[in-house]
Image (cartoon, rainbow, N blue to C red):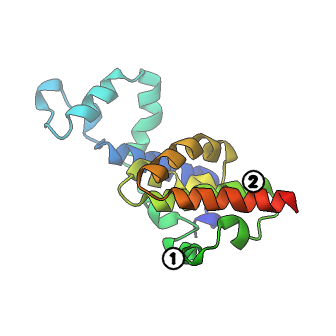
Amino acid sequence: SAHFLPPQDRAGGAIQDVLRAFNFSELIPTLSEDRVSPRQQSAFKIWRAMDVNIREILKPFLTSKYLPSSKLASLSPASFAKEALGKTVFELSQAKTYRDWAIKFVQKLIHLCGRGSKVVQACLATVEDDLATAHFLLPQLVLKVVHIGKADTIKSEIQAVISALQT
């Protein structure tokens, strides 16, 4: 389970996954402009535009062997099957704190976005370590979930929180 990996390993895996999502490979730093394939063109340009210090930090992640973040997720899509029955994260979770609820809600939204969003999926395992990451992703995830036609999920969650506050 991702929960038992150190946070720095989950973060390293997320960095690796983001780089792979944008076609970065171990070859990118060694290529010259005339040897870049069309598929590598964008990654090559981004790599060259980065500050040399950033490149040195990222270079080990071009060859790292972390498990993909999607395999490390502590909350699988199946764990959200209950929400399909009309329950919200707030109602289902035994979250005692805002932090617990917010992280589970962001993880649910990431799952709702689906596998098509590799960059967002890469953040799935790291969200449980860092509330600031969850806060950063939340507005973007809300927009994406609304865009894909699942706004009722967000509305239900907000209503569940408001109802709990009124009691």
Q: Which residue is mark 1?
A: 78
Which of the two labelled residues, at mark 2 and mark 1, occupies the earlier sequence position? 1
Depth order, front residue of 163/50: 163
Residue shown at 45% from the left, 55% from the top: 121
Tell whether 93 sits left or right of 60. right
Q: How many marks?
A: 2
Residue 104 shows in the view: no
- Spot the residue most to the right: 167
Depth order, front residue of 72/93: 93
Q: Quadrant of the C terminus?
A: bottom right
Q: Amino acid at mark 2?
A: Arg
Residue 34 drawn above or below residue 100: above
Q: Quadrant of the N terminus?
A: bottom right
Depth order, front residue of 124/32: 124
Within 10 Å of the Cα at label 1, are there few (<14), some (14-19), or many (20+) other Cα atoms? few
Determine the secondary structure under disc 2. helix
Depth order, front residue of 43/107: 107
Residue shown at 37% from the left, 43% from the top: 19
Determine the secondary structure under disc 1. helix
Q: Are marks 2 and 1 in contact (CB under 8 Å)?
A: no
Tell whether 156 sits left or right of 19. right
Question: Residue 146: x, y in percent?
Answer: 48, 51
Residue 75 shows in the view: yes
Residue 143 drawn above or below residue 95: above
Q: Amino acid at mark 1?
A: Ala
Question: Residue 76: x, y in percent?
Answer: 52, 71
> In which quadrant of the rendered view does residue 133 lie?
top right
Q: Which residue is mark 2?
A: 99
Question: Residue 11: x, y in percent?
Answer: 55, 49
